Amino acid sequence: MIDFKTIEYNSENNELVILDQTRLPEEEVYLTLRTAEEVCLAIRHMKVRGAPLIGVTAAYGVVLAARTSNQEQIRKACDLLRSARPTAVNLSWAIDRMERTLSQSNDPFTLLVAEAKAIEREDKAACKSIGDNGAELISDNAKIMVHCNAGALATSGIGTALGVIYTAKQQGKKICVFSCETRPLLQGARLTSWELTKNGIDTFTICDNMAATFMPDMELVLVGADRIASNGDVANKIGTRGLAIIANYYQVPLYVAAPLSTFDFTMASGDQIPIEERTDDEVRRFNERCVVAPSAKICNPAFDVTPSQLVSGIITEQGIISRPYTDNIANFK
């Protein structure tokens, strides 16, 4: 079903090959990363993105550092990778696992490779199970709105939110997707439209400010997540909260699809989730042209937090979590 790879580890050369997502949809270009520093920059500059995929990539970044480094150097590489982006909890979750593995041996390279491969394998399995669990929510001839990219480009498997759509399509259901463009970096326009059409899904790309116009026709909204608090508050790409408010007004259910690795049980609510602030130029410039007055100030948060009251359910690999979230999420720890 998916005819591209987002990531591949070359064990013979200890190299990591990633699909450069900043070049899509014009070019399908693969980059070879050889150091933890290169992996960190690839994550920070969004050449590789999506919370689950960031976790997998970071794990292999530790592997790249481990072959020729001592314990202290590997731990420094872990700290560097952890700093790449602050909001997606899968990043620190994966690094924590690699550090626990590191402490088990004075010569940990083989163990670290095995752990990184396990993280990748678990991500693929989680995507499949999320797809299976979420597909039951979708009826034939459904119209579905999505935001940003939570598909195969955001994971090492079939994706989370888009994985649900792919699974429903495999079941023979006809689906039409309305993909919000997702300013300022256009992950919906550039990535989701490329991925969905490549996999035979009928897709309309709409500007973000068109969502309210088309919402009444939707069966549901499907989004991913970068971090989910213990009470069900969801941090996701900026604009998700606005979609949730619009969906709630029109009584269209909004479902979040995410693996359990995206839950942060240390945070009681979304108020505690760190929100990444990105560079002014992402907003100030469009298609290499300045589109904002030079003296104007810029706000550019990469994520917003959707209150749990606006979330109809959270689709995980272990089932769909429903309200009351605080009680029900606790059962998944």
Image (tube, rainbow, N blue to C red):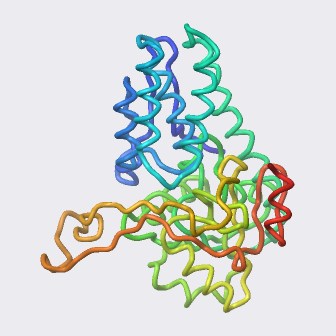
Q: 205 or 74: nearer the eye? A: 74
Q: Whole-percent x and y of residue 6? A: 51, 39
Residue that extends furthest to the top in the rendered view of this protein? 107
The residue drawn where x is 65% and y is 71% is: 176
Residue that extends furthest to the left in the rendered view of this protein? 294
Q: Is residue 35 above or below residue 236?
A: above
Residue 292 falls in image quadrant: bottom left
Q: Whole-percent x and y of residue 209? A: 46, 84
Q: Whole-percent x and y of residue 329? A: 80, 59
Q: Is 313 left or right of 179, judged from the image as shown?
A: right
Q: 332 or 259: nearer the eye? A: 332
Q: Is residue 180 above or below residue 50?
A: below
The residue drawn where x is 47% and y is 40% is: 82
Q: Is residue 142 above or below residue 260?
A: below
How many numbered markers are drawn?
Answer: 0
Q: Is 314 left or right of 1, judged from the image as shown?
A: right
* Location of the N terminus (image quadrant): top right
The residue drawn where x is 54% and y is 53% is: 198
Q: Whole-percent x and y of residue 35? A: 37, 25
The residue drawn where x is 46% and y is 12% is: 67
